[in-house]
Image (spheres, rainbow, N blue to C red):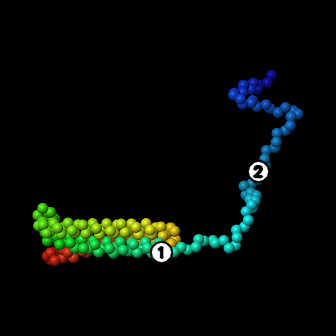
Amino acid sequence: MSNVPPAPEPQGSQPAYQPPTPGDSAPPPAPQYSAPGSYPAAPSNYPAAPSDYPTEKPKGSNKLGLIAFVVALAAVVIGSIVAYLGGQSLGTLIEYTGTSGTVDANDLPPAAQQIAASGGLLTFAGFAVFGVLALWGFVQGIVAVVKKRGRGWGIAAIIVAVLGGVIVSIIWGVGFAAGAAPYISA
C-alpha cells in the first residue's frame, strides 16, 4: 500500500495536474540564463547622427535678463525716493510727541493730521511701487536664468529685488530722521 493521499478534486475550470507517463514527449527544457555582466549588445536600428547636428541650443538674446535687472533697479530707486519723502513727512510729527514718545491723533491740529495722512500715503506708495516692480523683476529674472537669456543680468535682478526691501526701509528711516532732526533736542 502506498501512503500517498488521493489528489483533490479540481476547482472551477482549472485542470488538475497530470504527472507525465512513460512514452509522453518530454517538456521543453528550461531556458539557460547568462550572467548579468554578459548582456548582448542592443541592435542598432537607427543611423548615426549627422555630424553637423548642433550640440547646444543657439544662445538667445540677453534682453530678458537686462529688462529684469532694469525693472528691479527701478523698483529700488523709485520706491526709495517715494519712501524717503513719506518718512520725511512723518518725521516732522515728532514735534507733537509727548514725553512718552507717542502721538495722539486726536490732539493733532488739522495741518498735522494732513501731514500724517500724506506721509502715510507716501510711505505706503513707496513700498507698494517697490513691491510691484521688484516682484516683476524677480520673476522675470528667474525666467531669464532658466531660459539662459541674460543669465547674469537675471541673477543680478534677483539679488536686487530681494535685497531692495532692506534698502527701501533704510532710506525710509533716513527720511524720517531728516524730518525729525529739527525737532530733536540734544
Could you say where residue 23 lies in the image, as x and y percent from the top left?
88, 33
Instruction: Point out the tag, 2 or 1, that comes first from the N-terminus.
Output: 2
Q: Residue at coordinates 27% horizontally, 71% vertically from top-left?
A: 83
Q: Residue at coordinates 43% horizontally, 66% vertically from top-left?
A: 139
The circle drawn on residue 186 is: none
Structural distance between the alpha carbons of marks 2 and 1 = 59 Å
Q: Quadrant of the N terminus?
A: top right
Drawn side of residue 22 relative to residue 4, left or right: right
**Which element is circle 1 on?**
helix
Which of pointers 2 and 1 indicates the residue nearer the eye? 1
Q: What residue type is labelled 2?
A: Tyr
Q: Which amino acid does label 1 sit on?
A: Lys
Residue 92's quadrant in the figure? Answer: bottom left
Of all residues, the one furthest to the right in this rendering is 23
Q: Residues within 10 Å of mark 2 (few under 14, many from 20)?
A: few
The circle drawn on residue 33 is: 2
Say whether residue 7 is visible: yes
Residue 140's quadrant in the figure? Answer: bottom left
